[in-house]
Image (cartoon, rainbow, N blue to C red):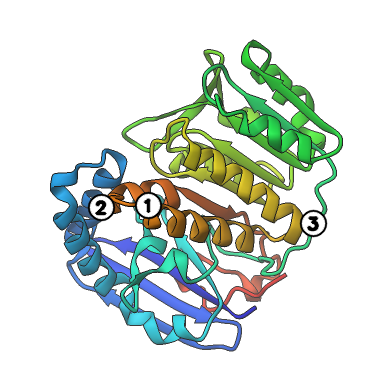
Amino acid sequence: MSTLFLYYWLEDDDVCMLAWDEDGVEEELRLEAESPLVLQQITTIYDILEAPQIERAQEFHTTLRLLSERLLKPFAALIDTHTLIRFTVTPDLIKAPLDLLLHRDQYLFVQRPVCYQVDIGLVDDEPQFEIENALVLADSNSDPLQACLEVAKQIDGSLYAEGENAIVAVLEEHAEDIDLIVVSARGRLNEDNTGAIVLNDEELDAEQIAQFGAWIVYFDSSQQGINTDYLGAFQYLSSVEYYVAPIISTEANRSYSDTMLWFMEKLLASKNPFQALFETRQRLFNDNSAEAGSDPIEVLRESYAFRLYEFVEYIDDEEDELDGADFLYAPTA
């Protein structure tokens, strides 16, 4: 698998971008004085996805095309020659839907496996992990189609709790020694992109996240894919390697239940979260697009919502230290 790394950050009013791969290819670009415009475009796209408005469909697609030309088109030739795209974003760009941008006039997320990172370091492009046990919790009213129960049935050694039994204390007791954690619960996000999930009126905070020892965590909870509290705790405090969660508000419907079921089915078969989410979102997009009278914005809401993160290991050798925008290359594990 050939990997392209794309790193985006802001410096004053400039938008900075750096692309590189394992073969030493490197391209850097700076959009001078364009950060206010780019942030406005990101906000427009995110807000329309978050609270879909049919009357703003044209604005959405126009803005998406303009943002794609700024942030993705400069690297189109590199994307063509790589099979996995890794985005690293700073907290002020956490809402940027980079894998929704257009590559060759099609959404990137249906063309390539994609992964996000919140820092730079050692990564694994071809993970192969066995999931031998799981902790699966479904809060009251969050999983009426019982997708969580179906996931628990697929994995021997699963511990499943629902309704009033799905409480934070269960996570605290078992989350350190488990391969997979799945939680379906209400999500809360503040204006500064901090927040929490709520299990039976009790919030799961970042300190509790720090105790997680799972290989992969899946939160079916609104907007928790951009919760910077959780992302920081996963990266810097826990031993969790992968995290999947929606970046927008979600509801209990068939598409989001299918997202969980299909992702877990493909993950167990391939042992590769990149490929599992890629195939899941591609199938959701194709199926929803094929429905008669389907609304394009709603199709994206129900197929694109979930984002995958990998949390990196750090390089100890001072000569290879990667610091902010000064890094040149992130070797694979």
Which residue type does callout 2 highlight?
Ile
Residue drawn at 14 percent across, 55 percent down: 59
Q: Is residue 185 placed above or below 262 in the rendered structure?
A: above
Query: Which residue does the numbered mark 1 point to in the structure image?
Result: 291
Residue 302 on image: x %, y %: 41, 46
Residue 232 visible in rendering:
no
Residue 143 on image: x %, y %: 56, 26
Residue 330 visible in rendering:
yes
Instruction: Classify 10 Å Cα crowding around label 2: few (below 14), some (14-19), many (20 and above).
Output: many
Q: Mark 2–mark 3 contact, CB under 8 Å?
A: no
In the rendered structure, which disc, 3 or 1, sits on the residue that comes first in sequence? 3
Marks 2 and 1, how far apart at CA: 23 Å
Residue 89 on image: x %, y %: 43, 59
Instruction: Classify 10 Å Cα crowding around label 1: few (below 14), some (14-19), many (20 and above).
Output: few
Q: Report the label total.
A: 3
Which of 107/169 is in front? 107
For residue 153, which quarter of the picture? top right
Query: Which residue does the numbered mark 2 point to in the structure image?
Result: 45
User: Which part of the image, by quadrant, shows the C terminus?
Assistant: bottom right
Q: Mark 3–mark 1 contact, CB under 8 Å?
A: no
In the rendered structure, which disc, 2 or 3, sits on the residue that comes first in sequence? 2
Q: Secondary structure at mark 2?
A: helix
Marks 3 and 1, how far apart at CA: 36 Å
Left of 16 or right of it: where is 114?
A: right
Left of 243 or right of it: where is 197?
A: left
Residue 44 on image: x %, y %: 21, 50
Which residue type does callout 1 highlight?
Glu
Instruction: Classify 10 Å Cα crowding around label 3: few (below 14), some (14-19), many (20 and above).
Output: some
What number is the disc on residue 129?
3
Observer-side mark, 2 or 1, equals 1
In the rendered structure, which disc, 2 or 1, sits on the residue that comes first in sequence? 2
